């Protein structure tokens, strides 16, 4: 293809210069501008979970059943899967910045549509488009963050940022308490205001995000090395001014790149399935396990509380659960850079899976409080592991394929676990509610537990020791001059082969 031909060849130290930077306020701007998307996702998912009862009445809601609530969750996830794939390839082709501005705009527009939904069909369509925006965000944002954050901080930043989903979940839970109180807000208006608040938050994020630069790594790959060089100089000057110290010397070797404007989809597919088959299996295992666990449990958690335990106001329960998830990702995040990726992912996956299985066995003896306490402990560990799944997918494949690989594994894993999970649990709740027997949900717990344990075992055998390593040494760019000279495993800082899995 003409668009794939080589347009130049350069030797650059841009990756090494970005990786050796000390942490500064500039990096916080990147975290706030890009990482806050997970707060939006958490807000969206939690609002739907908390509002299951508010959406059911025909006069003030939309006349939806428990199955409809589960279906809406599945539609949202389906949109996220397709949005990730669609916007993921555009992110690799047109750049990180264009896409993380576009996808946030899609989310904002669709959230407003949701707030004005007059019937279930409109609601389903709006939720699908909202999911597309969020799915596209995952690909664009994870790529940009990993390419701008120094290598010694990348693990903790990525895990903590992905865990910030639960900040949005906690906010959503607490916001729905007054918004769903008929003494405070008209029931026909409260759930609509909740969705509208998501759009307001998105506009605030957009203001900060405009100042985040394009990835210099993406720029020099695509023949725009002068722009990349200027951005890096600006970043270095800013960090030097903010830290009040001279910047460390650059120790990593420069890299020679054969520049192309675009990389063809067939070459990307060949990279994933031919050069890195073990990493492909690894990412699929991690994403399927965490997607089923979370989407199955959390999409219907509020519905389970109201159906089986007669909880009238689920916001407080959901907020406690969400805080535990965020604290797990935040407090454990540093260990992914110090103890290491493989040990931490293996441990968090297997432990949370075993605990979920235990919960399934004792489900019949639990009440609203003890079920929530089980969730608090299980997902304290699971949230850190699940966040690390996104970190893994964004680290272990070449720069040119990064966004699409994130999108691919997110879409496949979420389609398997995130669509089937809510549908299964919605059907199980409908079935169990007839007999008022919550133990009918145990089968879902056992499936989720099994998939998490399997994911942990796959990580133990196939995981990549990426802590403290540059992205280019973990997976050399396809366009690197020596990228196809040979093969072989590596764990070193500098590579001379494509380092197949």
Image (tube, rainbow, N blue to C red):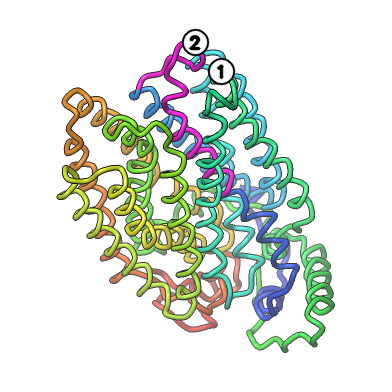
Q: Nearer the viewer, residue 173 or 48?
A: 173
Q: Residue furthest top?
A: 59
Circle 1 packing at 10 Å, graded few (<14), some (14-19), many (20+), is some
> What is the x, y in percent for residue 258?
66, 67
x and y percentages locating residue 4 in the rendered image: 63, 53
Disc 2 element: loop
**Mark sitting earlier along the chain (2/1):** 2
Percent position (x, y) of residue 423? Answer: 32, 31
On screen, residue 373 versus residue 47, left or right, reads: left
Location of residue 447 with respect to 77 vertically, above or below = below
In the image, is 95 to the left or to the right of 236?
Answer: left
Q: Residue at x 31, y 69 (%)?
A: 347
Which residues lie in the magenta part? 39-65
Front residue of 212 and 379: 379
Give the image quarter of residue 471: bottom right
| 198 in relation to 344, above or below | above
Indicate whether residue 63 is drawn in magenta. Answer: yes
Q: Nearer the viewer, residue 160 or 435?
A: 435
Q: Which residue is label 2 attached to? A: 59
Does residue 438 sit above or below 37 in this rendering?
above
Task: Name which residue lies at 71% across and 51% down.
Answer: 97
Q: Position of residue 125 (x, y in %)?
A: 52, 22
User: Which circle marks residue 107 in the picture?
Assistant: none
The picture quadrant where one finds residue 411 is top left
Element marked by disc 1: helix
Residue 11 visible somewhere in the drawing:
no
Residue, disc 1: 188
Q: Quadrant of the C terminus?
A: bottom left
Q: Residue at x 44, y 63 (%)?
A: 328
């Amino acid at each position: 293809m003409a668009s794939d031909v080589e347009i130049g060849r350069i030797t650059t130290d841009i990756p090494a210069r970005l990786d050796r930077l000390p942490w500064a306020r500039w990096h916080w701007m990147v975290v706030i501008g890009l990482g806050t998307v997970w707060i939006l996702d958490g807000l969206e998912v939690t609002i739907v979970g908390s509002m299951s009862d508010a959406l059911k009445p025909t006069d003030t809601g939309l006349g939806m059943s428990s199955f409809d609530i589960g279906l809406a969750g599945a539609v949202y996830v389906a949109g996220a899967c397709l949005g990730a794939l669609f916007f993921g390839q555009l992110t690799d082709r047109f750049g990180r910045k264009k896409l993380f501005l576009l996808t946030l705009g899609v989310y904002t527009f669709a959230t407003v549509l949701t707030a004005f939904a007059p019937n279930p069909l409109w609601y389903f369509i709006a939720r699908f488009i909202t999911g597309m925006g969020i799915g596209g965000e995952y690909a664009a944002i994870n790529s940009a963050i990993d390419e701008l954050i120094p290598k010694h901080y990348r693990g903790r930043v990525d895990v903590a940022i992905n865990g910030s989903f639960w900040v949005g979940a906690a906010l959503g839970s607490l916001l729905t308490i007054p918004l769903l109180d008929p003494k405070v807000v008209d029931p026909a208006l409260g759930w609509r205001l909740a969705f509208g608040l998501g759009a307001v938050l998105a506009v605030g994020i957009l203001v900060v995000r405009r100042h985040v630069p394009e990835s210099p790594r993406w720029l020099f790959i695509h023949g725009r090395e002068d722009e990349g060089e200027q951005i890096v100089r600006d970043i270095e000057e800013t960090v030097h001014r903010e830290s009040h110290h001279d910047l460390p010397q650059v120790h990593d070797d420069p890299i020679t790149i054969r520049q192309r404007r675009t990389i063809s989809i067939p070459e990307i597919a060949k990279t994933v399935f031919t050069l890195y088959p073990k990493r492909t299996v690894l990412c699929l295992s991690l994403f399927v396990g965490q997607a089923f666990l979370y989407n199955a449990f959390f999409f219907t958690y509020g519905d389970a509380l109201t159906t089986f335990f007669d909880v009238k106001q689920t916001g407080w329960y959901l907020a406690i659960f969400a805080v535990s998830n965020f604290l797990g990702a935040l407090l454990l995040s540093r260990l992914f850079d110090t103890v290491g990726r493989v040990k931490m992912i293996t441990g968090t996956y297997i432990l949370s899976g075993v605990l979920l299985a235990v919960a399934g066995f004792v489900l019949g003896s639990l009440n609203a409080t003890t079920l929530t306490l089980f969730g608090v402990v299980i997902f304290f560990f699971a949230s850190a592991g699940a966040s690390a799944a996104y970190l893994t997918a964004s680290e272990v494949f070449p720069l040119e394929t990064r966004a699409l690989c994130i999108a691919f594994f997110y879409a496949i894993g979420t389609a398997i676990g995130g669509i089937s999970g809510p549908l299964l649990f919605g059907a199980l709740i409908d079935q169990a509610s007839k007999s008022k027997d919550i133990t009918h949900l145990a089968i879902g717990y056992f499936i989720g537990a099994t998939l998490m344990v399997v994911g942990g075992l796959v990580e133990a055998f196939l995981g990549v020791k990426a802590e403290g390593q540059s992205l280019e040494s973990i997976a050399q760019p396809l366009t690197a001059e020596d990228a196809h000279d040979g093969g072989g495993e590596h764990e070193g800082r500098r590579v001379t082969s494509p380092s197949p899995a």
